[in-house]
Amino acid sequence: MDNTPNTNRFSNPQTRAGEDGIQAVSEEDLVKWLTAQFQSYPACAQVSVAKVIRLELPDSEGCNWSRTLVLDPAGVEPSDYVLAYAAAVEKGRKRFNLAVPPGDESPADEEAHGTR
């Protein structure tokens, strides 16, 4: 039996989906989920996430979206949403990967899957 670690294990976000409860979701669904997480904090009831940043390749944790979010803070001071930000992003990165839209695989994805 080969015990060599699979270094390409997280090269495809769909592969990571299903592992340890990871779900592949659309950017729209992830934005909605993150916004709900922010708004569960009383001081952040008006904060919303406008966009998540998709990474070209998954990071060392296998996640394909950045910790950097585009927010609409709705006048809420950063010092009031910083804890919600950290909690929402870390919780989300452990639960979700962005789904790759059909036909939208990058050359790096194709190479990782041997389809190039």
Image (cartoon, helix red, strand yellow):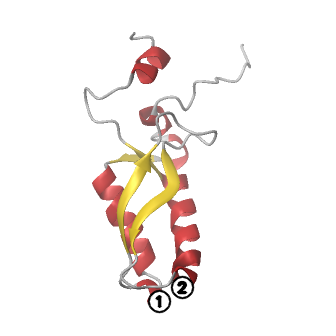
Looking at the image, is 93 positioned above or below residue 72? above
Looking at the image, is 88 positioned above or below residue 93? below
User: Residue at coordinates 53% horizontally, 37% vertically from top-left?
Assistant: 58
For mark 2, give the secondary structure: helix
User: Residue at coordinates 53% horizontally, 70% vertically from top-left?
Assistant: 85
Amino acid residing under circle 2: Asp
Looking at the image, is 64 positioned above or below residue 5? below
CB under 8 Å between callouts 1 and 2? yes
Q: Are there few (<14), some (14-19), or many (20+) residues within 10 Å of tag 1?
A: some
Looking at the image, is 79 positioned above or below residue 34? below
Give the label on residue 21, or none.
none
User: Residue at coordinates 54% horizontally, 85% vertically from top-left?
Assistant: 80
Quarter residue 101 falls in: top left
Percent from the top left, x then y, of residue 109?
43, 23
Percent from the top left, x then y, of residue 6?
64, 23
Give the label on residue 43, or none.
1
Q: Quadrant of the C terminus?
A: top left
Q: Quadrant of the N terminus?
A: top right
Going from N to C along the chain, the mark reached first, 1 or 2, is 1
Quarter residue 42 falls in: bottom left
User: Residue at coordinates 44% horizontally, 84% vertically from top-left?
Assistant: 44
Give the CA separation, mark 1 to mark 2: 6 Å
Amino acid residing under circle 1: Ala
Give the label on residue 80, or none.
2
